[in-house]
Amino acid sequence: MASALALNDPSSERRSFTARAMALFAIAMLLVGVLVARLIQLQIIDYDTYRTRSDENRIQVQPLAPPRGLIYDRNGVLLAENRPVSSLALVAERVQDLDGLLTELRALVDIDEADLANYEKRLKRKRRPYEAVTLREALSEAEVARLAVNRFRLPGVEVRTELKRHYPFGSVMAHAVGSVRRITEEDLQGFDAHESSNYSATEFIGRRGVERFYERSLHGEVGYQRVEINAHGRIRQVLDIEPPKSGRDITLNLDSRLQIAATAALGERRGAIVALEPKTGAVLALVSNPGYDPNLFVTGISADQYQAMVTSLDTPMFNRAVNGQYAPGSTFKPVVGLAGLANHVVTWEEEINDQGWFKLPHQDRIYRDWSWRPGNSGGQGTVNLHRAIYRSANVFFYDLASRLTIAQLGSFARQFGIGEQIAVDVEAASRGLMPDPIWKQGVKGEVWYPGDNVNLGIGQGDLLVTPLQLAIMTSVIANRGRVVRPRMLKLGADEQPPFEYDPPRPLPDVIGPTPDDWERMVDAMEDVVHRGNKGYGQNGTAWAYIGMDDIPYRIAGKSGTAQVVEIKQGEEYDEELLDEYTRKHAWFIAFAPADDPRIALSVLVENGGGGSAVAAPVAREVLDYYLLPQLDLAVRQ
């Protein structure tokens, strides 16, 4: 009985239960304390840290691309604008099965292999997490509608409508205004940190012409928005926004109507036309033919289209007006004549007997006049400088150039911009080449021969110019020796120039010729066009082609025919035996009205043949359009 009572000691059991309960309670309180401490750490001590992490999961800061500045011509006509374009984009982080998604998308819109290849390239570029990458551009309205209806089953798919560059004039203005291209990793690597950030949402960058030269002003400044996103990566709401700053609008000196007229005058022929306003240097027209449609590089160009352009013998993407370098032929003769006058090597009264050929002393090589034919010595008879200009007498200029030193001719020609780049804001304009003994020794490893001077006398040899440079040279003659730098940008009196615009440093007037020399040279160039009905061998070289009609204004001009391939001595140039791309280039330079010039231009018809017969009529069309108000009125109507 006693042992049974010992086994059932209630007091002992209560003490044991109480001890256990207190231990469990202590453990529970300890755990609660740990939980409370952790909650305090999470909610109070580390609140900012974890709130930031939470926000990063549902809130994104997205860059906003600025609208690109617009480009206008001198009359307020839009040359480059921005138009809304819808595109299909994928958020790669939200796409679980790309192949399956593509199968569904192809049932709704056209997606080819080129689209996929471009998508892969864009995906590899540096980008922000959850940033949409374009898969297909320029969606039609029907395609946008189909994607919208099926959006609920297309995770990671976005249809974005953005402003993209559009060029209303297409190929007509491509080489004058330039174009944009999709920005590349190389472009971004060339930026500093600030510039790279400013292009964080930008797809396109100026690549050619005005678009490239004034890129920083046209681009604007990037903006930002904080957005809340859902689990599918789509925006639920915009929390706040810092809007982007639009790029600056700019106005050019270009006259779009004159550009159209000049392009039409060239027709289907390869060539270039550059027209300047002599007094101001304003670039009125800058045509390179054939051109290309710059819109293809914005909305998407196929591999076949691009390959066709880059392999074409007509090189439509090559800007002949500012990068094409050609021998100027006889258009260079006015500079040679003025150089002779400036260096007192010739006078206006000095005459020679032009028998159709020229030989340097103690040499056998014969340099012939353009009028020479086998069995007919040709020749211009008694020739002075005035007649040598309007008849383009080669022999006179052979002789004159042989008496000038290359230093005299070279330094004088450079004052006209030959071999120099003096334009203010013409992107990547070539310098051409005014050869000299140092250049020849360094490049060809040869000494300078007297025959090199002779060739320069008629604008041949190693001399190279661009159509822009010949227009500048023509403008200097029109200004009677005053040199004005060409410029694309048109600025109002109180307008601040764009960031990139460097106010042009004035250039000195051409030194050497007297005022009378300039006027007499202009008179001689007028006779190129207006001297006619005087009998064979007495008319200006261009009179029969553009001067026979009653011109209501006076044109001062000069034709030029530049040889492309060498013709051996004693052989006759036969155009029919030559491949089209090895035939002579046709040049014509002109300014009008001659006494008070409003326009100066150079015309090149590549492999066109004779300058007077081919290029002069093109120049006449352009001059008529610009100077005759009734033609302008007809176009307006």
Image (cartoon, rainbow, N blue to C red):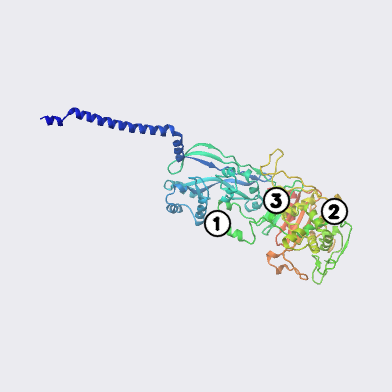
In this rendering, would 36 be left or right of 516?
left
Q: Quadrant of the N terminus?
A: top left
Q: Position of residue 366 (x, y in %)?
A: 81, 68
The amino acid beneath tag 2 is Ala
Quadrant for residue 302, please give it. Answer: bottom right
**Real-space CA distance between mark 1 and mark 3, rounded to the nearest whole angstrom:** 30 Å
* Circle 1 or circle 3, nearest the eye: 1
For marks 2 and 1 on the same chain, the one whose residue lies earlier in the sequence: 1
- Which residue is label 2 attached to? 342
> Where is mark 1, residue-wise?
302
* Residue 66 shown left or right of residue 238 in the figure: right
Front residue of 335/370: it is: 335
Q: Residue furthest top?
A: 11
The CA distance from mark 2 to mark 3 is 32 Å
Disc 2/disc 1 C-alpha distance (Å): 56 Å
Element type at marker 1? Answer: loop
- Specify few, some or many for label 1: CA neighbours under 10 Å numbering under 14, 14-19, or 20 or more: few
Instruction: Residue under label 3, please give it.
Output: 285
Q: Can residue 289 be seen at all in this image of the molecule?
A: yes
**Which residue is pictured at 85% across the width and 49% down the height?**
515
